[in-house]
Image (spheres, grey):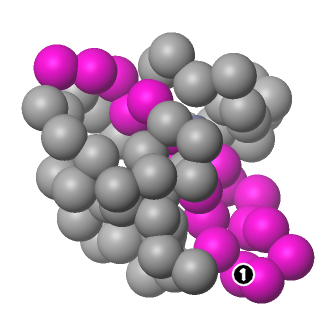
């Protein structure tokens, strides 16, 4: 299980990136929202989409959940 966070600030394409706690690309504290602990990024992105419909896995830490 890892802790997952979402970037409250959208990327240029409108996506809100979902990161796990180990990612080097975690957003700044004021831009990150805690999602919860999940065993996979798929569950984290599912939860994230409830809050931000354009949530997407980070291509560095959650690349199996990243869609371009
Ligand atoms: Zn990441």
Q: Secondary structure at mark 1?
A: loop
- Residue at the location (64% across, 74% down)? 15
Residue at the extreme right: 12
Q: Quadrant of residue 30?
A: top right
- Residue at the location (16% across, 20% down)? 1
Visible residue check, residue 6: no
Q: Is residue 65 above or below residue 36?
A: below
- Residue at the location (57% across, 53% down)? 59
Q: Is residue 7 above or below residue 65?
A: above
The residue nearer to you, when weighing 20 against 50, is: 20
- Residue at the location (17% across, 52% down)? 43
Q: Is residue 30 left or right of residue 33?
A: right
Q: Is residue 46 left or right of residue 14?
A: left
List the residue tagged with mark 1. 14
Which residues, given as a range, are shown in magenta? 1-20
Visible residue check, residue 55: yes
């Amino acid at each position: 299980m890892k802790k997952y966070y979402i970037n409250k600030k959208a990327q240029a394409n409108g996506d809100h990136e979902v990161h796990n706690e180990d990612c080097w690309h975690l957003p700044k504290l004021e831009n990150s929202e805690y999602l919860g602990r999940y065993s996979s990024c798929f569950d984290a992105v599912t939860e994230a989409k409830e809050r931000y419909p354009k949530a997407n896995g980070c291509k560095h830490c959650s690349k199996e959940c990243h869609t371009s």
